[in-house]
Each structure stands twice: as C-alpha cells, then as structure tokens.
Amino acid sequence: MFQTLKNAWKIPELKNKILFTLMIVILYRLGSNLPMPWVNPEMFETYFNASGNALTWLNMLSGGALAQATLFALSASPYITASIVIQLLTIAIPKFEEWAKEGEAGKKKLSSITRVLTVVLALVTAIGYTMFMNSQGMLTFTSNEEWSGFEKGMAYVVLVLAYCAGASVIMWLAEKINEKGIGNGISIILFANIISRLPAMAGSIWNRCFTSSHSSFSSSPSNSRYASSISMPICSRATASGTRPWQRMPDF
C-alpha cells in the first residue's frame, strides 16, 4: 500500500488531486468547529451524551458537529437525502428517466435539481433543528427579557439561514472533490467525520469497560467486605473471630 502511495505521489496530476482533496477535508473540519452564536454547546452536548444510539450515530456521521451545534451541524444529510430522492424519481418520472439517459447533459440537469432540493431540505431541517434547541432551552436569548420579540425572531432567522448555508457549503465542497479531487466527495466527507470521532469513541469505550466496572465492584457491599477481609492481617482476622492464631493451628 505504501509503495502504491509513493508511486502515486510521483505523478504530478495525481499528486495535485490528493493535495486538493486534503485541502477540502481540512476546510470542512474547520467549518465543523465554527461555533454558532446564541447556542449553549455544553447543554447541547450533555443532552446528546444522555440520549440513545440514534442521536449518537447521527453525531458520529457529522463528526461531532451535531452535538456541538456548529456551522456544519446538518452535515451532508440533506445532500444525501436529495440525491436518493432524485434517483428514485428517475424511475417514477419519465422526464427524469429521459435526462438520465441523455449522458452528461442530462446528468447536469439532474444535478441542478438535486442542488435545489438539497437547499429546500436543509432549510426544513434547519427550522426543525432551531425549534428543537429552543424547546430544550439551549438558546441563550430565549430567557433573556432584554430582547424584544423582533430581535428574537431575527435571531431565529439568522440561525436557520446559517445552518442552511452550512449544508449548502458542504454540498459545494463535495462537488469540488468530485470534479478536481479523488473519489466520491460525500464518501470522503463522511469518512473524515467518522475518523475524527474515533478518539472520543475509544475513550468512551474505555471508560465504560474499565472505569465503570471498577467503580461498581468497589461500590458493592459484598465486594467491599471481601476486599476488606483480604486486606486485613491474619492475626487481626483471627482475633476478631474470638480465637488466637496459635489456637487455629492443626495438631500433629
């Protein structure tokens, strides 16, 4: 494998594609760590840590951006959903099926419709995401009496548009990887998200398997008595039982 990468690095065109893909991934990871205004990320992350596996899985696919409520919190989900919907509609709608058979020109038309549908889905998801944060008290201006109703409404609009714009930027980055990089753009982004969550997942597994089991063993009453009996000297245990150490020795 390393020899293959070494040979690929010697080809200028392939080398440029690799560097371009790495640059896009770095830009994406930077966007995944950009905080959003008026959001309490600590409360949001605490909620996700206490939730079920579904939210944990979605958070892993977003590279932790969903739990931190950053700019790229929606990740590539709107784009993936839009792509699946368009592919299914090519079977149901004759016009879409005709475009799919036209070659490159038809694919461009379908790509344009996919982009529009991605923005629509991102807008709907961003509205639901913001309403969810508002219902859970995760927005700092919700309980602020100094803010007027108009100011709070404008803050909601800014958050929704920002999350929608973040999903659109992710779509653009994925398409740039398809054009000038290596591999499928969405697959590269999802792979980068999963890799970025591996250290946190490893730490969580370590704490659950070792730290929790050790604490539960120590907190158990029977285990505490057993541990104290082991640590108690033999003479002390014999004295506590009412017999002397030499009285417990067998006769020969």
Image (cartoon, rainbow, N blue to C red):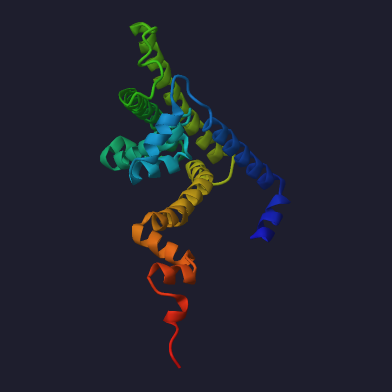
Which of the pair 181/57 is nearer the observer?
57
Q: Is residue 22 above or below residue 224?
A: above
For the view shown, which residue lies furthest in the left direction? 92
Count numbered badges in the picture: 0
- Asked whether 87 or 191 is in front, the reply is 191
Write the residue at 45% across / 39% down: 62
Percent position (x, y) of residue 87? 35, 41
Of 80 and 126, the residue lying toward us: 126
**Image-quadrant location for residue 92:** top left
Q: Is residue 239 above or below residue 17?
A: below
| Residue 21 visible within the image | yes
Please state if 171 lies on the left or on the right of 221 as rendered: right
Furthest residue to the right? 10
- Please state which of residues 98 and 144 is positioned toward the viewer in this rendering: 144
Image quadrant in which the C terminus is located: bottom left
Residue 184 vertical position relative to residue 109 in the rendered view, above or below? below
Quadrant including the N terminus: bottom right
Asked where in the image residue 78 lies, by quadrant, the reply is top left
The reply to whether residue 101 is in sight is no
Residue visible at 45% across and 22% down? 162
Image x and y of residue 120, in percent: 35, 26
- Residue 225, position as x, y percentages in the image: 38, 62
From the top left corner, tell me how far across and down residue 17 is, in percent.
63, 43
Vertical comparison of 37 with 225: above or below:
above
